[in-house]
Image (spheres, helix red, strand yellow):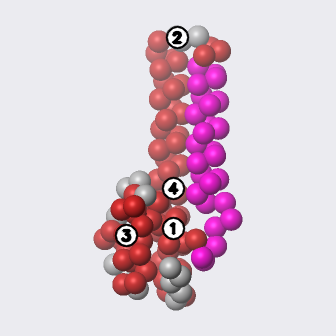
């Protein structure tokens, strides 16, 4: 199913994708901070904490790369659907988009 996005829809999509990406970065940083706070408070083993932090950062980086690297107009709707499924954006934020594009994002988000 190929939906051609207007310039307006592409602009809205880019803005929403950036908003969702910022939320993802915030969530990632909170995860990293939680690991460090646990280490500080409980004086956990330095090596175990380092490996846990490294693995968490690496996994998060892979997630971000899979979702956002090589982003182009043809992938905007799928990225929005993934963000919607992860509750990084809401259906209400899609209201300004073309109804076909909005419905496609919502439908795909339910499948993900």
Separation of marks 3 and 2 at Cα, in angstroms: 47 Å
Which image quarter: residue 69? bottom right
Q: Secondary structure at mark 2?
A: loop
Can residue 95 be seen at all in this image of the molecule? yes
Q: Would residue 13 appear left or right of 92 to someone viewing this image?
A: right
Residue 57 % position (x, y):
61, 37
Secondary structure, magenta segment, majority class: helix
Q: Secondary structure at mark 1?
A: helix
| Number of residues whose C-alpha sits closer than 10 Å to that of mark 1, classed few (under 14), some (14–19) or many (20 or more) | some
Q: Residue 105: percent from the left, percent from the top?
A: 42, 71
Label at residue 78: 1
Which marked residue is nearer to the observer: mark 1 or mark 2? 1
Look at mark 4 in the image and give the residue it sits on. 22
Residue linked to disc 3: 107
Number of numbered callouts drawn: 4
Q: Earlier in the sequence, mark 1 or mark 4?
A: 4
> Residue at (58%, 34%) from the top-left corner?
56
Residue 43 numbered tag? 2
Q: Residue at image x 47%, y 44%?
A: 27
Compared to residue 70, the image places residue 47 above or below, namely above
Answer whether residue 68 is magenta in the image. Answer: yes
Q: Looking at the image, is mark 2 or mark 4 earlier in the sequence?
A: 4
Q: Give the alpha-carbon distance from disc 1 to disc 4, as whole Å.
A: 17 Å
Q: Could you say whether the residue bearing mark 3 is in a helix, strand or loop?
A: helix
Q: In 3D space, how far apart are the residues under numbered discs 4 and 3 (Cα atoms)?
A: 24 Å
Q: In this orientation, which residue lies closer to the viewer: 36 or 76?
A: 76
**Real-space CA distance between mark 2 and mark 4, rounded to the nearest whole angstrom:** 31 Å
Measure the alpha-carbon separation of dots 1 and 2: 43 Å
Percent x, y of residue 91: 33, 68
Position of residue 61 relative to residue 94, above or below, is: above
């Amino acid at each position: 199913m190929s939906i051609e996005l207007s310039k307006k829809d592409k602009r809205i999509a880019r803005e929403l994708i950036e908003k969702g990406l910022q939320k993802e970065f915030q969530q990632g940083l909170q995860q990293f901070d939680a690991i460090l706070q646990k280490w500080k408070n409980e004086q956990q083993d330095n090596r175990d904490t380092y490996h846990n932090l490294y693995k968490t950062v690496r996994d998060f980086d892979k997630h971000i790369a899979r979702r956002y690297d090589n982003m182009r107009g043809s992938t905007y709707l799928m990225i929005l659907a993934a963000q919607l499924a992860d509750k990084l954006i809401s259906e209400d934020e899609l209201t300004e988009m073309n109804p076909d594009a909005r419905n496609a994002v919502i439908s795909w988000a339910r499948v993900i």
